[in-house]
Every structure is written in C-alpha cells, then in structure tokens.
Amino acid sequence: MLRKENILLVDDDIQILELLQRHLKSMDYHTYKAISVKEALHILKDTEIDLLITDINMPEVNGIQLVKYAAEHHPDMSKLVVTGFPSVEDALSVIKSGATDYLTKPFTKMELAKAVKKSLTSRMSKRVIQSSGNTFITNSYADMIGKSEAFQKVTEVIDRVKDNRATVLVRGESGTGKELVARAIHYSGRFARAPFIAVNCGAIPENLLEAELFGYTKGAFTGANENRSGFFQAANHGTIFLDEIGNASPAVQSKLLRVLQEKEVTKVGSQKTEKIEVRVIAATNSDLDELIAKKIFREDLYYRLTVVSINVPPLRDRSTDIPLLIERFLRKYGVEYKDRLVRITPNALEVLERYLWPGNIRELENVVQRAVIMCDGEIKLQHLPSELKYQIDFPKKGFLTLQEKEKEYIQQVLASIGGNKTKAAEILGIDRKTLRGKIK
C-alpha cells in the first residue's frame, strides 16, 4: 500500500490554511499546517514532506526565503508558491528561487489539484558538471590554480623574485595557500634543484625553536647529546620557509636578523659562526605592525623581511577561482576514495561558489573531501554542510554582542569541518588552547 503524500501548507491566514487543508484531504493527501516560516522550519526538520505549498507575503520572513531554504536543504521536495502577483517577472522570480510551480490567487479546487499533481510528478532534469579525463587545467602556476585578477597579481610578483635570493614576506589569512606561494617561488626558479625547507614557527615550542633553526652543540642544554645542524644549515644554497614568523621569540628574531644581515648562523652553545647562502621566505597571518607597536616583534627585522611583500588574497576576493579549485579537489579525492572521477551538480556548485569561505582554500578542500566521501559518484546538495546552504535570518530585537557574534562564527567553522578542533584553530588563527577556552 502506497503512503499518502505529505504536504506542508504555510500561510499566515488561518482561513486559507483550513480551506487548502479541506481541499487536499478530499484529494487523499496528508497535510501539515504552519502559520509562519519559523513554524514551517520546525516541521521540515522532523517530518518527511513531499510538497511545500507556501504563500509569499507573510510577516517577518516571506515565502520566497522559505522556498530558497527548502531548495537547498530539501532539494528532492517539490515547492509550490501561492501568489497574488501573476506578472511574468514575479513568476520568473518564484521559479528562480527554487519553486517547481506557482499558483495565482484566487484559484479553484480543480486548479489546485492540477498544480499539486504537476508539482508532485515533475522531474526536473539533472544536469551535472562533469570532470572529464581529457580535460586539462591550464589556469595554473606551479601547484597553484586560478584565473582571477587577484591570483594573476600574485603570480606576477612570483615571476619577479623566483630567480633571485631576495627576502620575501608572504601575508594572508589562514588557509589561503601561503606555503604554496613559497614553494612556487622556489620550484619555478633557477634554484629549484637546491633544498626547500619549510618550518612552522608556531608548531615548535618556543624553547626549542632556536635550536631547531640554527642547530646546537653537544652539552648546550639538557638532552643535547651530540652536535646537530639546524634547518638553516639544511637549507644552505636553497630556500627556507618560515611560516607564522610572528611567533618567533626575541632570541630567534635576533639571530634571524643576523642571518639576513651577515649571511651567517651560530649554533646554540657555540661561538663559531658558519657562512650560509639561503633565501628566506617568511609568512604570517598576524598583524606585524601591531606586534611591533607592542614591542613583540623587532622593527628592524620587519624591514629586512619585507624586501618583497606578497599579499595572498582570501578566497572571497577570488571567487572565480572556486570552480577550478573544486575541479582539482574532485580529481584528487575522487581517485583517492572512489577510484574514479566524481561529479558535482550545478546547484551544489552554486552553493560552494556563493559561500564566503572564512577558512579559505583549506576549508573548501575539507568540504569537498568530505562530500566526495559521502557521495556515490556525484556531489549533491545533501552532501554539503547545512551551514553552507541558504539560511533564514529572522528579525532580532537589538544587536548581537561581540561575544555572541564570535560564538556564532566559531560554531560555524567547527560545524563546517566536522568539529575538528585542530583545523578550526588553524582557520580561526588561534591556538588549540585558546579555542578550548572559547568553547568552554
């Protein structure tokens, strides 16, 4: 026995709701009623609905917003809009919002039956964007991808510095690909065969960073049982990339300044200097000007590091690059997890293109990676986190406090990456200890 179709009716006019319910019950449909969008969302959350019928003009939040929300959170559900504005422009607006059809007031029982049947039986063609094995991405530079003007500005500077040893400071938000820029400088230039050493200054304890960077002699400190070279010696004749340089201690900053000025390093516990030839590329998502004002970062080191400065744009400023990045991640994780190419539907792609990506490329990659794992060869709307989809903002009295906005943002980031606190801390630009405190 086939179950009755569930129809959700949304209208702030009780009399119209009851009229619709009587008509639909006589047609053997099962109905739910809601007098507001907020009430409708509660029903949609806990009930399997086959068809949404909603009025447009309602207080606080209108029906178009509800249809947009339903189109992304419940893509398989049909949506029928009841409107008193039968113009072509309004009809197009209704359809573009995600509605299957619209019904113009006033309407007869027969017209209602026809519209409901059409909405329930319609099958919209599902066009997909397909990654073809014969497609080659040409909008690339080294291991980076993009075609936007902001991306081109970065590659133009890379072309200027890749064949010399000028010190470079790479600025940008967390997740924008600052290390990729550093690798592009090194591996695209004439020093590509020399070593490339990447060091995350924020991941090494402050009391160990100096020894790791410059090496140490036997007996220099407890546990120093032998002479050992550091990262700078390992990078000799090549490039050393110092990520999160703003976390370097005063002692490390002092020694780094000497490296840049004198081209020499001194191991911890030694008085002997060693000459080296190393290109230094530093990166930060911190405001170094603010750290200088607070006497945390040396101003003379800052000027030594910024011989050339590269600003890596956030993903929200290079949205035209998002489809190219998605294509790369689909290839990468499709082969890794599915042993084949994975596709993405146009409406799912549209959601990813619209999102602002506070975690930048790293966050985009995490979302695509998860979607590839969850899908069966084709990424659809239901495979994307709810936080990325259309959200209804109900009117609020007064303003949110800064603490409330911060809480809301942290929750959004955590939800977008499955609660991974380490990745969340990276995206937010804080350490795990700080994040744990904020969560509590």
Image (cartoon, rainbow, N blue to C red):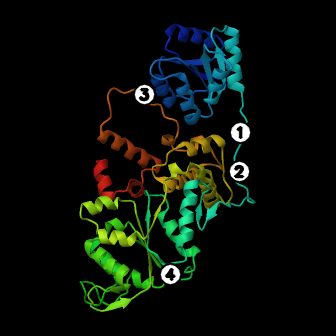
Instruction: Check disc 4: other Cα within 10 Å, few if <14, some if 14-19, many if 20+.
Output: some
Q: CA distance from mark 4 to mark 1?
A: 49 Å
Q: Which residue is mark 2?
A: 130
The reply to whether dot 3 and dot 2 touch (C-beta < 8 Å) is no
Q: CA distance from mark 2 to mark 4?
A: 39 Å
Image quadrant occupied by the N terminus: top right
Q: Is residue 10 left or right of residue 112?
A: left
Q: CA distance from mark 2 to mark 1?
A: 12 Å
Instruction: Check disc 1: other Cα within 10 Å, few if <14, some if 14-19, many if 20+.
Output: few
Residue 243 appears in the picture as rendered: yes
Q: Which residue is mark 3?
A: 394
Numbered tag placed on residue 195 in the rendering: 4
Q: Position of residue 325 (x, y in %)?
A: 59, 55
Judged by depth in the image, the label closer to the viewer, 3 or 1, is: 3
- What's under tag 4, amino acid-wise? Pro
The numbered mark, 2 or 4, whose residue comes first in the sequence reads: 2
Q: CA distance from mark 4 to mark 3?
A: 55 Å
Question: Looking at the picture, does residue 350 appear above or below residue 156?
Answer: above
Q: Which residue is mark 1?
A: 126
Question: Which of the 4 quarters of the picture holds residue 404?
Answer: top left
- What's under tag 3, amino acid-wise? Phe
Residue 4 appears in the picture as rendered: no
Who's the residue at 65% across and 22% down the image? 89
The reply to whether dot 4 and dot 1 touch (C-beta < 8 Å) is no
Question: Looking at the picture, does residue 106 appear above or below residue 410?
Answer: above
Q: Is residue 248 left or right of residue 388?
A: left
- What's under tag 2, amino acid-wise? Gln
Numbered tag placed on residue 343 in the rendering: none
Who's the residue at 33% across and 26% down the image? 397
- What's under tag 1, amino acid-wise? Lys
